[in-house]
Amino acid sequence: MPEKTQTYTTAVGRRKTASARVKLTPASKMSITVNGKPAEQYFNTKERLSITADTFRLDDVTGTYEVTAKVMGGGISAQAEALRHAIARALVKENAGLRAPLKSAGYLKRDPRAVERKKPGLRKARKRPQWSKR
């Protein structure tokens, strides 16, 4: 039985509590699908839509790809940035020469900031109840 060759590249990207799993396939026309919907429909605003396609706008990235993504957790903006992180990682897997421009643009860095947990005795993570002497 002949072996099937893998024609796509996979990667995972994260931001806050959002994570995105991406399958990057070379294609004749550029398309981004998120959770079964076109990216334009899933990310309603132009800003979030441009965040997802930022990696393809770099001068060094050539070729057109079909991006299929599954995003979960977090908010919609964090999901867009997690998707950008995953696409950048998949592009580096496919072409190691893209690592330097993607890294200098900041797309390969996982943004670790997350909400701080609430501590007992406090109203929020750091907000304390008002203190009165008497």
Image (cartoon, rainbow, N blue to C red):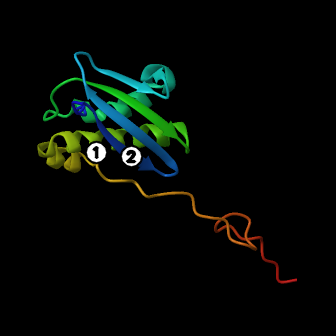
Say if residue 112 shows up in the picture: yes
Three-letter amino acid code at the position of disc 1: Arg
Quadrant of residue 112 within the rendered picture: bottom left
Up the image or down, 92 lies above or below 126; here it is: above
Look at mark 2 in the image and give the residue it sits on.
13
| Number of disc labels | 2
Dot 1 or dot 2: first in sequence order is 2
Up the image or down, 40 lies above or below 105; here it is: above
Residue drawn where x is 48% and y is 21% of the image: 37
In this view, the residue farthest toward the front is 1
Measured in 3D between alpha carbons, the distance from the residue under mark 1 to the one under mark 2, in whole angstroms, is 7 Å
Residue 37 lies left or right of residue 83; in this view the side is: right
C-beta proximity under 8 Å, tags 1 and 2: yes
Residue drawn where x is 15% and y is 40% of the image: 95
Residue drawn where x is 19% and y is 39% of the image: 94
Quadrant of residue 32 within the rendered picture: top left
In this view, the residue farthest toward the bottom is 133
Up the image or down, 41 lies above or below 12; here it is: above
Look at mark 1 in the image and give the residue it sits on.
89
Tell me the quadrant of the picture where the N terminus can be found.
Answer: top left
Q: Considering depth in this image, is 106 or 70 the residue closer to the camera?
A: 70
Would you call the spot at circle 1 few (<14 residues within 10 Å), some (14-19), or many (20 or more)? many
Three-letter amino acid code at the position of disc 2: Gly
Could you tell me residue 73's position as x and y percent? 55, 44
Could you tell me residue 17's position as x and y percent? 52, 51
Helix or strand or loop: what does disc 2 sit on? Answer: strand
Could you tell me residue 123's position as x and y percent? 74, 65
Could you tell me residue 68's position as x and y percent? 38, 29
Tell me the quadrant of the picture where the C terminus can be found.
Answer: bottom right
